[in-house]
Amino acid sequence: MTGWDIDPAGVSGVLSKSGTAAKDMSKAGGAMQKDLESASSAAGTLTSQYGPYTSTAGVVGSALAQFAQHWNRDLVYIARRTEKSLNGAAEATTAYVHGSQEQAANAQQEAAKEPAIDMPGAGEIGHRTEGR
């Protein structure tokens, strides 16, 4: 590649702001998980009136659990994609500053690759799959 014209200070500023936003997003995701658990618990349970007297999650609690399970994989993907993008931009800029355009191009290509996510339920309908 030729014609690179990178402003390292500008990249650093953008990465700093993006890193702060990513941390805020991570905190929001953690809070959402806790809030979903709390809402599910507060929504009540179903108890058999004839015994044995066991309780199971109610309709709302079950729906919230399914919602969380459905979107968890996509949220993990977003977090990993963000991390790889920020790290790749930092590595490419560092290589550029050190005068290695080849290293910068390699770091940029590595950052563009899809992140590998190995979680239960791979291949299920409704979950993010590699390459999409």
Image (cartoon, helix red, strand yellow):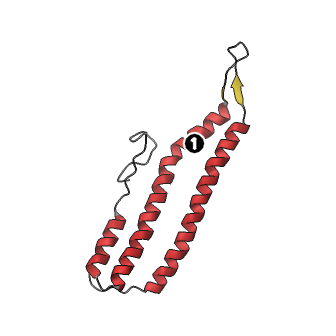
* Residue name at image x 52 percent, y 43 percent: 70
Quarter holding the N terminus is bottom left
Q: Position of residue 71 (x, y in %)?
A: 52, 47
Residue at which label 1 appears: 67
Residue pushed farthest top? Answer: 50
Q: Quick one: 88 or 3, which is closer to the camera?
A: 88
Q: Going by the image, does 97 lie left or right of 12?
A: left
- The answer to which quarter of the image holds residue 105 is bottom left
Indicate the position of residue 9 as horizontal and vertical percent values. 47, 86
List x then y, in percent, for residue 15: 49, 75
Query: Residue at left 28%, top 81%?
Result: 101
x 70%, y 18%: residue:
53
Dot 1: element = helix
Looking at the rendered structure, the kind of residue marked 1 is: Phe
The residue carrying pointer 1 sits among few (fewer than 14), some (14 to 19) or many (20 or more) residues within 10 Å by Cα, namely few
Question: Which one is in front, 70 or 106?
Answer: 106
- Residue at x-position 36% and y-position 51%: 130
